[in-house]
């Protein structure tokens, strides 16, 4: 949700309070911003070198991409906990612990947080009061972030099963064997759920029934999360390609060859597809044709997905930097030294950047230097 949308919601809540009617503002955010995994944030940009606004010491390594709703930042960590942190000053509000590491991003829907843990469970909790609403056992380790679409949590596990769970009750709706481990978040528009597998398959499932609609076979493993954008599915592959498939039938529309494996979700808007590979190259592609618009290189591997705003692209590299690029031509706007090879991907919220610092064990907020 962008700045203007949040402003409108706040104005409406004030008017309702004046009228004497209680109101609750609800936002839903998750891995790569939405259930389609677009990585697009309708935000204003940090076009100048940022500085640290605050830092929260997690006490454990964390590669979990933050998710922010209202005044709370939610992150997972190797200590098995989801940390709820005050967005204003970086102070800890609450923690909720599981029995396994959490490298994935949670889904936050109002006060309910949905999270996956390497203990093999998916949880629905109210972190702020430490209330567990339900727990769903997948029967296998889970690395992927959950996806929430049309009241259903959809997630894949390393044993090769995709699970659809009623978000309110935790009841299993359907389970499908996709014949390969699922490492990344599933993309869903509420009608179709698209999943990539470690066996090199990209599958589309009916989101209501789990029925297999189509199956595209890549040459190597798919470790990237897919993106649904309008009538296309965009996904990266270990065979050094960015693929565009027809959402309707899985037909290959275009494929763009890169320098090495693409293991993170592309980010997509009407202006550009941004894809990054393990060789450290970041590419801006035309969303319609797949032709290269620009290319830039960092000095490390890109193991976390990029995010985009109307004017900029933000990428974390294992060279220890966060980079901001101009969305039109890829010109570098700035780079910020995190000094961590395992920092998470960035999140943009109200003009600030939030990310975790891997083995440095911190969550940091970056703001404009002149704030």
Image: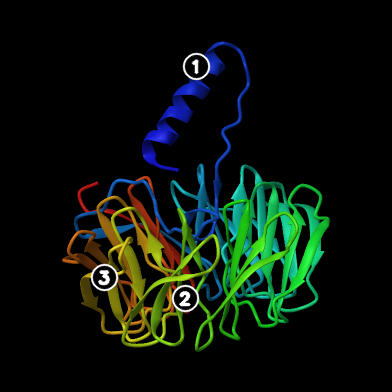
Tell me the number on the disc at residue 15. 1
Which one is nearer the viewer's eye here, 155 or 288?
A: 288
Quick check: 331 left or right of 74? Answer: left
Residue in the image at 32% along x and 83% along y = 258
Which one is nearer the viewer's eye here, 145 or 49?
A: 145
Quick check: 303 left or right of 189? Answer: left
Whether label 2 touches label 3, CB < 8 Å = no
Q: Which residue is mark 2?
A: 358
Q: Earlier in the sequence, mark 2 or mark 1?
A: 1
- The local secondary structure at tag 2 comes to loop
Q: Nearer the observer, disc 2 or disc 3? A: 3
> Is residue 77 among what the camera can see?
no
Quadrant of the snapshot with the N terminus: top left
Q: Which residue is mark 3?
A: 291
Q: Earlier in the sequence, mark 1 or mark 3?
A: 1
- The local secondary structure at tag 1 comes to helix
Quick check: 205 left or right of 290? Answer: right
Residue in the image at 49% along x and 70% along y = 251
Judge whether 44 appears above or below 161 on screen. Answer: above
Task: Give the farthest residue toward the top.
Answer: 19
């Amino acid at each position: 949700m962008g700045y203007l949308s949040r402003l409108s919601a706040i104005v409406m809540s004030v008017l309702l309070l004046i009228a004497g009617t209680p109101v609750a503002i609800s936002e839903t955010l998750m891995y790569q911003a939405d259930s389609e995994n677009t990585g697009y944030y309708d935000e204003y940009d940090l076009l100048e070198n940022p500085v640290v606004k605050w830092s929260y010491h997690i006490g454990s390594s964390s590669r979990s991409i933050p998710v922010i709703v209202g005044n709370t930042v939610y992150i997972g960590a190797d200590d098995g906990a989801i940390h709820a942190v005050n967005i204003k000053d970086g102070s800890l509000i609450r923690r909720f612990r599981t029995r396994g590491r959490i490298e994935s991003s949670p889904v936050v829907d109002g006060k309910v947080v949905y999270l996956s843990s390497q203990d093999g469970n998916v949880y629905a909790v109210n972190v702020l009061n430490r209330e567990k609403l339900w727990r769903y056992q997948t029967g296998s380790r889970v690395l992927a972030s959950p996806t929430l679409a049309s009241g259903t949590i959809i997630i894949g596990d390393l044993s090769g099963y995709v699970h659809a769970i009623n978000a309110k009750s935790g009841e299993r709706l359907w389970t499908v064997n996709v014949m390969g481990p699922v490492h990344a978040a599933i993309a869903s528009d509420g009608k179709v759920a698209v999943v990539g597998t470690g066996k090199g398959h990209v599958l589309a499932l009916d989101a209501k029934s789990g029925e297999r609609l189509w199956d595209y076979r890549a040459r190597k493993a798919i470790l990237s999360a897919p993106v649904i954008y309008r009538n296309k599915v965009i996904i990266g592959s270990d065979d050094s390609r960015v693929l565009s498939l027809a959402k309707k039938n899985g037909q290959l529309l275009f494929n763009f060859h890169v320098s090495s494996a693409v293991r993170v979700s592309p980010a997509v808007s009407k202006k550009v597809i941004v894809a990054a590979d393990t060789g450290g190259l970041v590419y801006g592609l035309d969303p319609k044709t797949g032709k290269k618009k620009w290319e830039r290189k960092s000095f490390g591997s890109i193991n976390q997905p990029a995010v985009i705003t109307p004017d900029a692209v933000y990428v974390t590299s294992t060279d220890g930097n966060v980079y901001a690029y101009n969305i039109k031509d890829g010109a570098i706007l700035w780079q910020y030294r995190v000094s961590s090879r395992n920092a998470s991907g960035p999140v943009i919220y109200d003009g600030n950047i939030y990310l975790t610092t891997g083995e440095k064990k911190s969550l940091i907020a970056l703001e404009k230097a002149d704030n």
